[in-house]
Amino acid sequence: MWDYGLPLTREGIGIDLRSLDQVIDYPARDMTITVQAGITLSRLQETLAKENQRLPIDVPLPERATLGGALAANVSGPRRYGFGTFRDYVIGISVVNDQGQEIKAGGRVVKNVAGYDLCKLYIGSLGTLGIITQVTLKLKPRPEEQRLVAIGCKGGVVLGQLLDLLHRSRTRPVCLEVLNARAARHVCAEAVEFASEARWVVVLAFEDNRESVTWQVKQIEAELKPAFDHRDAQLLAIHNSARLWREQIDFQAWPDALLTFKANLLPSATADFCRLADARPEGLILQAHAGSGIVFGHMCGNWTLEQSQRMLGSLQEAATASQGNVVVLKCPTAWKTALPLWGLSRIDYWLMRAVKEKLDPKGIFNPGRFVDGI
């Protein structure tokens, strides 16, 4: 999480919460669990799997990522399209405030409506309002069946047409991913029979009971056949579904990227934005959560600050036209004050500052790292 956000405005003490990793309460029949925030996502999912349950939020590098860190950054992945984000699953939270006191919001039961919903306030605040120490989550049962479908597209125009078809489809995929050819060569390596002439790869996931998944896969195939010539869009054979899932989830934490950005825009504008980004000279590696209008991009190589500024300016202009924004998730530390890390300014920053001043008046927690230097 240290790659994310502006530099600290003053030195401080880093707090390691990885020893706070215990399961406090797990009433499996109630489909909830209360855990300490230092637990890793992989250990949390392993605990839930024993009861045939799960938290359907995809977090990159789950063996390293802690629940508290993922909440602070509001991380989500491919399944966001079908299942939402952390804000949909946190029903109780404990936080240490600026006085060293533990405050609590929500509770341990799903039907809890008393008071302000402070849970959502802390999620995505990048640790600037307090230290998350304990969380209660509502859960989902593990699906009986899971299937992936990969489709290769020859051109950008075809990609737009294909996404329009998928949005109109009678099926209900839990993820709708788009990879440009550069990303597909990494994400799909040894997992998908990648067609060398394909410029884009679309990956769908279906999770439900066996009968429903079987019908949805057949339905997608039936909808594709009359709509596209085989040369324009074709189904690709998947050899290793588990690896394809893992690579898609870990993509946003690409270790070799010089700069990583995240664009949020209208889902209907995803194809056009991806085409624009793919055509840029930086050779961007792109993955889009196309159903949610989110695009991740990595710039690799020996590019300069000025080139990065031009690239982000072009993408920001396109995102703004689609009612969106572009933020920088990772870049060299020396560039952070010169790049628009949080994208365009917003008119509600005064409100964010007012919340910060109420909950952390002395500016103890992560000073200066959040939007507008909060």
Image (cartoon, helix red, strand yellow):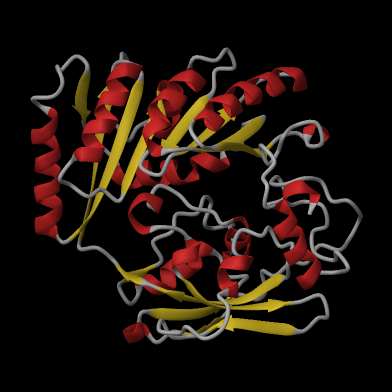
Say whether residue 228 is visible: yes
Which quadrant holds residue 346? Answer: top right
User: How many dots with numbers?
Assistant: 0
Measured along the vertical axis of the image, is residue 232 above or below residue 174?
Answer: above
369 sits left or right of 207 in the view: right
Please give left or right for residue 165 compared with residue 370 in the image.
left
Which residue appears at 30% of the width and 51% of the height? 174
Question: Which residue shows up at 37% across the image and 34% down it?
Answer: 268
For the C terminus, give its image quadrant: bottom right
Q: Is residue 201 above or below residue 26?
A: above
**Residue located farthest toward the front when viewing the structure as drawn:** 347
Residue 198: in sight, yes or no? no
> Residue 152 location in percent, x, y?
27, 25
Q: Residue 173 location, x and y as percent? A: 25, 48
> Residue 21 location, x and y as percent?
60, 75
Q: Is residue 183 above or below residue 59?
A: above
The residue depicted at 29 percent of the width and 16 percent of the height is: 154
**What's the residue at 36%, 50% (across, down)?**
81
Left or right: where 152 falls relative to 342: left
78 relative position to 354: left or right:
left
In front: 32, or 21? 32
Front one among 28 and 95: 95
> In which quarter of the view is residue 127 placed?
bottom right
Question: Which of the pair 231/170 is nearer the observer?
Answer: 170
Whole-percent x, y for residue 82 in the image: 33, 54
Residue 320 vertical position relative to residue 135 in the rendered view, above or below: above
